[in-house]
Amino acid sequence: MLKSLAIRLFAALFIFGIRSAGAAGELPVVDYGILRQRDSLAVWIDLAGCLTSGRLDQLKEGNGLAIEYKVELSRPRRLWGSEQVARKDGFVLIDFRFITEDFFLEAPQLGIADSRHLNSVAGLQDFLADSIIVGLVAWPALDTQKVYAVSIEVTSISLSGLNLAAGGPKGDSGSPLKYLFGQFLRLTGFGRQRFSATSRPFSLSEIASSD
């Protein structure tokens, strides 16, 4: 019975997912910069582009928004491939409160474990544009004679009742059915938009300090 229900729901979601992806039409635009901050190599990510008009409408309709980011520092090898030096993952959760008509967000990896109150769309956009700075590795641990590269992956996820982020900030894998739904939604990209970029190889002497 559970298997039959799961198959039917998967089929319905697959059709709905294709329609949603086709109708969305808005892709996040993400900018970034590499800097030296507090004696660490860090990456600033501008996530304001993830707050598209469609995502904003969904927030005001009661669907939360999760923005996941993965930042990796690697050392390119001469002949092939690259060697990973450091990697940091994190997420930002955003909700809209109807009664007070403002936004609350959480970003535990940035030291914002409790909800931060933002009373306007402009304030939320400013935070997403200026405040996401990911420290990757202590500066003294890096070899000044080597070159490095940074790769970034950002995924914005509409946290509707069905779009569970399996293994993510609001994922709930306690139920086998919810786990299967989460995996299915990841495979189909339902309610998700992705951005990725890789920097050109750079030397540490090119990196400006923000201190």
Image: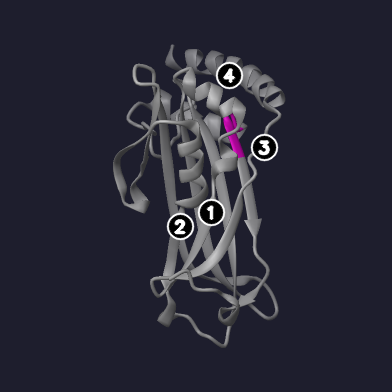
**Dot 4, how many residues are within 10 Å of its Cα: few (below 14), some (14-19), or many (20+)?**
many
Q: CA distance from mark 1 to mark 3?
A: 16 Å
Residue at the image point whose x is 65% and y is 22% from the top:
20
Q: Earlier in the sequence, mark 1 or mark 3?
A: 3
Q: Given this view, does label 2 or label 4 mark the residue nearer the observer?
A: 2
Q: Which residues are magenta?
A: 189-193
Image quarter (top left, top right, bottom left or bottom right) of the N terminus: top left
Disc 4 marks which residue? Answer: 13
Q: Given this view, does label 4 or label 3 mark the residue nearer the observer?
A: 3
Q: CA distance from mark 2 to mark 1?
A: 6 Å
Q: Are marks 2 and 3 in contact (CB under 8 Å)?
A: no
Residue at the image point whose x is 56% and y is 47% from the top:
154
Disc 2 marks which residue? Answer: 133
Q: Nearer the viewer, residue 9 or 140?
A: 140
Q: Are marks 4 and 1 in contact (CB under 8 Å)?
A: no
Q: CA distance from mark 2 to mark 3?
A: 22 Å
The residue most toward the left is 114
Q: CA distance from mark 4 to mark 1?
A: 32 Å
Helix, strand or loop at label 3? It is loop
Q: Are marks 2 and 4 in contact (CB under 8 Å)?
A: no
